Structure formats: C-alpha cells, structure tokens
Amino acid sequence: MNGIEQMRGKAALVTGGTGGIGKEIARDLARTAASLIIVGRNASKGAEAERELRASSTTCAIAFMQADLSLVREAHRLGR
C-alpha cells in the first residue's frame, strides 16, 4: 500500500502551513486523499496557501484556520 492509499479517509492538521517546512509538508499531504487543515497566524498568507494547494490537488479537501498557537485562548478556540 502506498502513502496515498494509507492517507485515504484520514485527516491531517499542519501548523505553520503557510510557509517554510510546514507548507512543504502541507504540499505533500495535498497530494494524498486525506482531508487537510492548515493552521497559521496570517490570514492573507493562509488564504494564499489554501488557494495554491487546492490548485495542485484534486483529491484532497483543504481548509485554512487562522490561529496564533502561542496564545492559549487561540489554541482552545481552534480546538472547538
């Protein structure tokens, strides 16, 4: 079973998915059949990353959620 098949029907959450290594991980996950949630602090960078990843994937459901995970209240809000 390949990596794409292993991710079918699963969900992945990537923090810092708007740039750097987080975005590269999100890009790899977008090639699978998983549902992908990208979390980041910057709404405009998040929207751009979501748009870019959706354009490169036809099998992955992708969403961006804005949160600053250095703040406890933001982590709680994200978890709801």
Image (cartoon, rainbow, N blue to C red):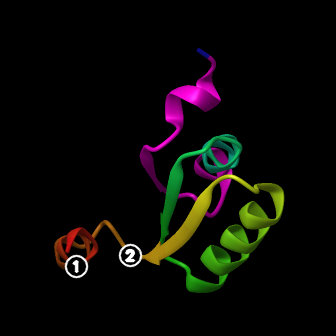
Q: Nearer the viewer, residue 34 or 79?
A: 34
For residue 66, above or below residue 25: below
Look at 68% across and 40% down and name the residue there: 28
Q: Amino acid at mark 2?
A: Ala
Q: Amino acid at mark 1?
A: Arg
Q: Nearer the viewer, residue 68 or 14?
A: 14
From the image, which quarter does the C terminus lie in?
bottom left
Drawn side of residue 39 relative to residue 48, left or right:
left
Crowd tier of the residue under label 1, counting other residues whose Cα lies within 10 Å: few below 14, some 14–19, many 20 or above: few
Look at 76% across and 57% down and name the residue there: 58
For residue 8, above or below residue 53: above
Residue 70 is a magenta residue: no
Q: Secondary structure at mark 1?
A: helix
Q: Position of residue 57 (x, y in %)?
A: 76, 55
Q: Position of residue 52 (x, y in %)?
A: 78, 67
Q: Position of residue 42 (x, y in %)?
A: 55, 79
Crowd tier of the residue under label 2, counting other residues whose Cα lies within 10 Å: few below 14, some 14–19, many 20 or above: many
Drawn side of residue 79 relative to residue 17, left or right:
left
Look at 65% across and 80% down and name the residue there: 47
Residue annotated with mark 1: 77
Residue 16 is a magenta residue: yes
Marks 1 & 2, CB-CB < 8 Å contact: yes
Residue annotated with mark 2: 67
Magenta range: 2-23
Q: Position of residue 21 (x, y in %)?
A: 63, 44
Q: Nearer the viewer, residue 61 or 73?
A: 61
From the image, which quarter does the N terminus lie in?
top right
Q: Secondary structure at mark 2?
A: loop
The tag earlier along the polypeptide, 1 or 2, is: 2
Mark 1–mark 2 distance (CA, rounded to whole Å)? 8 Å
Residue lying farthest to the right in this orientation: 55
